DNA sequence: TAGATTGTTAATCGATTAACAATC
DNA sequence: TAGATTGTTAATCGATTAACAATC
């Protein structure tokens, strides 16, 4: 008896990209699309798109393609983004404040429920719809709002301590803007957003 | 006669992470390190680190490990970050302004030489050390300062037009904060930073 | 029906890991 | 010298692609 292996993480990572492209096709008043059209828009082979989707079900029709609304709904189910998630921000510097004002979170079901900083100068000031609170209060807020997702926008030097605190309070997903690698238990997922390392990746290829 | 294949892009992408870890080891007053220690810090196998580095040279000593200062210098050479790069920002919303105030760019040799927006309300206002200029002026500034790197922080809907303009003006590397996939010539490199797709990648794994 | 496009298989391609001789 | 760690090889593992029968 063979057990079906879980879909590869690299495939999971492409689903949000597919979803974004489908949303934009829907906004342009299309009803159906094909793996070819989608691949064209994303610079991905049609075979890869079909293979990726086949991990989760048969969503298309031979000869026709994919119903866009239907595929959007399926992907939103798979990714669990068909609900509202509560999110906290740690650090209220320029990055944290930009995140607090980023409307695409709300548009996609990510509701900000807290922003925290250690700096008493910043505490009680506004940030988007929120008021900056002392970092000490973060665990309480996380538990009260059943927060599973946090964004770290602190200096690199304190990011690991913050991550430990978040994990202790029940956070399972961390979006890390701090320029450092975090060590967390393996059931906690991290995505890194460090513009400097991304720029350094590209400078390799620049010919002057 | 066999031609050595170029190092894989996935390896290039890890070098900045190694560099960052080495910088932090150096700051802690270490002189040497090993592939084991580095792997420990980064959650990467020591074999992978050695293999990755071996694409570029023999940087270590058997029995001893790697001289940190030396390896940092080598990696900075390889990645071409041992010089100053001029960078422009397109879009002066919250994200663009946060980027204009992000000091890690300057610390790593990325010098901001322009920030642009279409909104006449924003033009002539300050952003970090810069003054926001009309987007129409971007091609001139890019050519004057020999800019090869741009960051797009505009709404998704205009990002492709902006990218076309940048490529036309000579930009080879684009860091894209706009939530869309860009189509560019193959000698132009793009890195995407879309927090929403990264969050959606992680929600898949959350158990409630 | 004829044309189009899926889902899937098998082949190819590429990346990671384990193991170890070389050697500091 | 003995212990440690590299650089490299071969084996393993995993991801992508090409091709096509199935079928709408």
Image (cartoon, coloured by chain):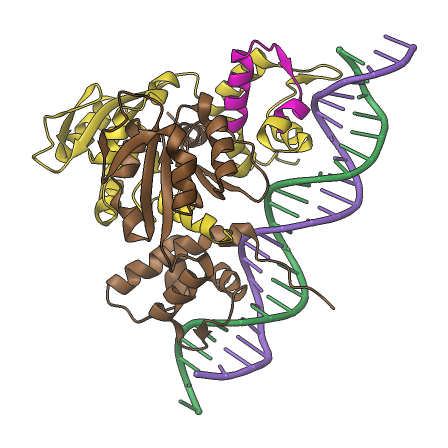
Chain colours: A brown, B yellow, C green, D purple
Image point 41% across, 59% down: which residue? A39
Q: Can you name the residue that lies furthest to the left here?
A: B120
Quadrant occupied by the C terminus of chain A: top left
* Residue stretch in magenta: B17-39
Q: Is residue A4 above or below residue A104?
A: below
Residue A8 locus on image (x, y percent): 57, 53
Q: Is residue B29 above or below residue B155?
A: above
Q: Main secondary structure of the magenta part?
A: helix
* Location of residue A116 (image quadrant): top left
Residue B11 visible, this orientation = yes
Which of the 4 quarters of the picture holds residue B95?
top left
Query: Looking at the picture, does residue A149 appear above or below residue A4?
Result: above
Q: Nearer the viewer, residue A190 or D11?
A: A190
Left or right: where does residue B45 sit relative to residue B140?
right
Q: Residue at x 69, y 32 (%)?
A: B47
* Above or below, comparing residue A85 to residue B139 in the picture: below
Judge left or right: residue C21 versus residue C14: right
Q: Quadrant of the N terminus of chain A?
A: bottom right
Rendering coords of residue A10 (x, y %): 53, 50
Identity of the residue drawn at 58% across and 30% down? B42
The magenta stretch spans residue B200: no
Between A160 and A43, the residue placed more toward the observer is: A160
């Amino acid at each position: 008896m063979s057990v079906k292996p879980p879909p590869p993480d690299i495939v999971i990572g492409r689903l949000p990209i597919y979803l974004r492209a489908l949303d934009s096709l829907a906004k342009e008043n299309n009803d159906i699309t094909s793996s070819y059209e989608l691949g064209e828009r994303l610079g991905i082979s049609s075979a890869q798109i079909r293979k990726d989707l086949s991990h989760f079900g048969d969503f298309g029709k031979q000869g026709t393609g994919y119903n866009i609304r239907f595929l959007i709904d399926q992907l939103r189910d798979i990714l669990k983004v068909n609900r509202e998630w509560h999110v906290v921000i740690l650090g209220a510097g320029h990055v944290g404040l930009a995140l607090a004002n980023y409307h695409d979170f709300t548009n996609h079901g990510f509701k900000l429920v807290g922003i925290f900083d250690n700096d008493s100068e910043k505490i009680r000031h506004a940030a988007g719809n929120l008021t900056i609170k002392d970092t000490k209060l973060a665990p309480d807020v996380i538990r009260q709002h059943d927060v599973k997702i946090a964004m770290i926008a602190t200096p690199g030097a304190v990011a690991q301590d913050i991550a430990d605190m978040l994990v202790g309070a029940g956070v399972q997903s961390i979006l890390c803007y701090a320029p450092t690698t975090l060590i967390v238990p393996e059931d906690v997922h991290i995505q890194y957003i460090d513009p400097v390392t991304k720029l350094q990746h590209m400078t390799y290829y620049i010919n002057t």
